[in-house]
């Protein structure tokens, strides 16, 4: 009765890939790579019966077992319990629930744009309960202009905003730092087309970070990169990824021409803010077309150990005609476990031409 | 020092001194300060609408809770409330390790030289070694409890007989061993969904009925002897971290209760 077992904590979840696995630590927001053979130690209730395993394995593999146990204990992935206690620890619910129709929005802007931001926020975002917005300015912009937008945001229930903007000499970095510190809803400012890569201001509890990058972000084709830097090891995104797309679910975008889209990089528009209401756009039968495409349905991704902590992209894919093909800008191969530069992969050249990205790739 | 009324009651086999519960709570003060009593009175008249507790429930005393636990046979730590060092010493001799924590509200306000000082008090350990340093025979009435060795702690959000529980593995970390609120942000305590046994849930439902509450946050200990030990129920406990970490979606439960599922 009081025999000791080891149970996997419910927020540490094993995700099996083609040739290795991850333990996704959704509480501490990190992942641990593990060999597939380690998974077999756990039974279907996520328990390890160490005594039983020791009897089953050969003498010379004992040290491997010990190594695995050390890894699990050191990271606090497992805890000791008896059989009766183990039944009191249910698995983590994989339900995803979110109190709004649209959870995040992207608004694009360049020198030819003529958006009425007050109207966009009041008529397209507030009614959906959207609380997180990314603004992307492909060209330089005056601080006063940004300040007018932040004023609208500050007076609304919008919780966080991210700004991507071209570096502009007329805004001294010191003034920008001050401005960001004054406006607490700014999560991050990314200055593109800068002379070097630099962290201008450190984050403060996840807000107020300013980074400058050399890269020029002059249109929406720069988006869609899949990389481990963008992994999210969180309950919210992990559960969302079980039944929804990790990029496009509950996303609404206004592109640089004022077109209402799911994502600015997609060609399909559901009308323009000049003449189309939110309701009409959202109720279009194709607006939510990609919302429920999960990584478990996407080719290659479905065999990847990172599939539930990864972002996705349906705008740029390896086979533009196949909506279930792998994201074009992912260089990971889950069969060989190697990360490679996606843009030089010979198999991707056709798609790169299709999306007219040759210039972007050369840089 | 303000004089305290002392009342003698009996907990289990122990003789315990008890002071009259402190009514000077944080919440009632802030309500008075905001002069919002007419609004609160008005809301309290809306009893035909779905409600989650009443404003007056915010002041339900911990001592009353412990007294009721005795009645329904729910285990709680041996407890002493005293102003006497001699009594405390006796208590520590019997139980070896004792903790002290606020009788009512961890937030206290003092006025020193005309300035407001606010304190937050967490639970602290008392051993006979620590007591050797004290020389005065009397102190402000304080609460002491036998320290319960635990396997893990339990936090359970309760609403209309539904429990949303989690286990907190606070024992691996020296910082959080006595009070899990001494958070370690680098390596936070493991917190995972938990299911209370039905027998314990039944007792807690009984307790809530006796207290006249339909909502609260329970703090319990799962002891090294595999016993569930009641610490307290807070009618205005925080639920967001429990909801988020266990994906319990308590916000929806609350919304549906208040809107009657409409």
Image (cartoon, helix red, strand yellow):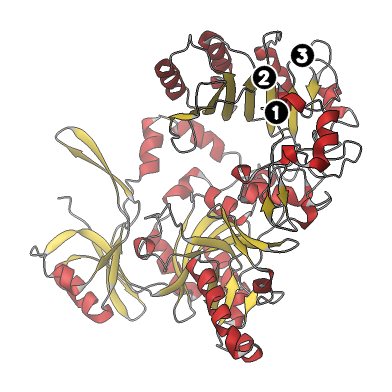
**Residue identified by numbered label 3:** A257
Number of numbered tags placed on the structure image: 3
B41 left or right, relative to A236: left
Quarter occupied by residue A200:
top left
- The residue positioned farthest toward the left in the image shown: B135
Residue A190 in the image, given as x and y percentages of width and height: 55, 26
Dot 2 or dot 1: first in sequence order is: 2
Q: Chain of mark 2?
A: A
On screen, residue A52 above or below B172:
below
State if disc 3 and disc 2 touch (CB < 8 Å).
no
Instruction: Please name the residue that numbered disc 2 is placed on.
Output: A218
Judging from the image, mark 3 belongs to the subunit labelled A
x and y, in percent, of residue A220 in the image: 72, 24
Q: Earlier in the sequence, mark 2 or mark 3?
A: 2
Give the image quarter of residue A266.
top right
Secondary structure under tag 2 reads loop
Residue depicted at 61% across the width and 82% down the height: A83
């Amino acid at each position: 009765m009081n025999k000791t077992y080891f149970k996997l904590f419910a927020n540490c979840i094993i995700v099996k890939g083609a040739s290795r696995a991850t333990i996704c630590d959704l509480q501490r927001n990190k992942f641990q790579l593990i060999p597939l053979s380690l998974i077999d130690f756990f039974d279907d209730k996520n328990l390890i019966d160490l005594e039983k395993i020791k009897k089953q394995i050969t003498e010379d593999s004992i040290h491997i077992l010990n190594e695995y146990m050390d890894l699990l204990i050191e990271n606090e992935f497992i805890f000791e319990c008896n059989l009766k206690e183990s039944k009191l620890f249910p698995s983590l619910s994989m339900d995803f629930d979110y109190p709004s129709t649209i959870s995040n929005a992207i608004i694009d802007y360049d020198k030819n744009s003529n958006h009425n931001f007050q109207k966009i926020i009041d008529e397209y975002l507030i009614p959906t309960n959207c609380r997180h917005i990314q603004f992307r300015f492909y060209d330089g912009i005056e601080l006063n202009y940004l300040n007018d937008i932040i004023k609208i945001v500050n007076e609304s229930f919008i919780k966080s905003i991210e700004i991507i903007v071209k570096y502009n000499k007329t805004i001294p970095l010191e003034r920008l730092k001050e401005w960001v510190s004054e406006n607490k809803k700014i999560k991050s400012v990314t200055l593109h087309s800068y002379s070097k890569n630099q962290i201008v201001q450190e984050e403060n509890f996840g807000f107020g970070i300013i980074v400058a990058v050399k890269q020029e972000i002059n249109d929406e084709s720069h988006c869609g990169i899949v990389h481990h830097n963008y992994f999210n090891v969180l309950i919210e995104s992990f559960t969302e990824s079980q039944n929804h797309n990790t990029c496009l679910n509950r996303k609404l975008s206004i592109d640089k021409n004022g077109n209402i889209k799911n994502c600015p990089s997609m060609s399909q528009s559901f009308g323009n803010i000049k003449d189309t209401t939110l309701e009409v756009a959202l109720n279009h039968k194709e607006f939510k077309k990609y919302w429920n495409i999960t990584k478990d349905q996407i080719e290659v991704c479905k065999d990847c150990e990172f599939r539930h902590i990864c972002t996705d992209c349906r705008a740029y894919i390896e086979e533009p005609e196949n909506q279930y093909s792998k994201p074009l800008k992912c260089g990971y191969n889950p069969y060989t476990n190697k990360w490679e530069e996606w843009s030089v992969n010979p198999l991707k050249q056709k798609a790169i031409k299709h999306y007219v990205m040759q210039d972007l790739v050369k840089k | 020092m303000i004089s305290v009324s002392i009342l003698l009651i009996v907990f289990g086999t122990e003789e315990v001194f008890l002071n009259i519960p402190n009514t000077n709570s944080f919440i009632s003060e802030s309500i008075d300060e905001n002069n919002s009593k007419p609004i609160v009175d008005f809301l309290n008249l809306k009893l035909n609408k779905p409600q989650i507790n009443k404003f007056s429930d915010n002041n339900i005393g911990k001592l009353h809770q412990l007294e009721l636990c005795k009645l329904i046979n729910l285990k709680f730590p041996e407890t002493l409330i005293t102003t006497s060092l001699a009594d405390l010493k006796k208590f520590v001799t019997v139980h070896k390790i004792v903790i002290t924590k606020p009788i009512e509200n961890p937030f206290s306000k003092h006025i020193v030289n005309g300035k407001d000082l606010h304190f937050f008090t967490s639970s602290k350990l008392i051993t006979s070694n620590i007591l050797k340093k004290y020389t005065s025979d009397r102190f402000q009435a304080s609460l002491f409890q036998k320290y319960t060795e635990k396997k893990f702690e339990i936090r359970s959000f309760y609403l209309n007989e539904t429990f949303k529980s989690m286990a907190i593995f606070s024992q691996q970390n020296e910082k959080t061993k006595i009070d899990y609120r001494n958070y370690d942000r680098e390596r936070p305590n493991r917190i995972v969904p938990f299911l209370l046994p039905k027998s314990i849930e039944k007792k807690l439902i009984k307790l809530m009925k006796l207290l006249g509450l339909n909502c609260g946050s329970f703090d319990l200990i799962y002891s090294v002897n595999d016993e569930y030990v009641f610490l307290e129920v807070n009618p205005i406990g925080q639920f967001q971290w429990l909801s988020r970490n266990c994906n319990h979606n308590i916000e929806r439960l609350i919304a549906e209760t208040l809107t009657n599922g409409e």
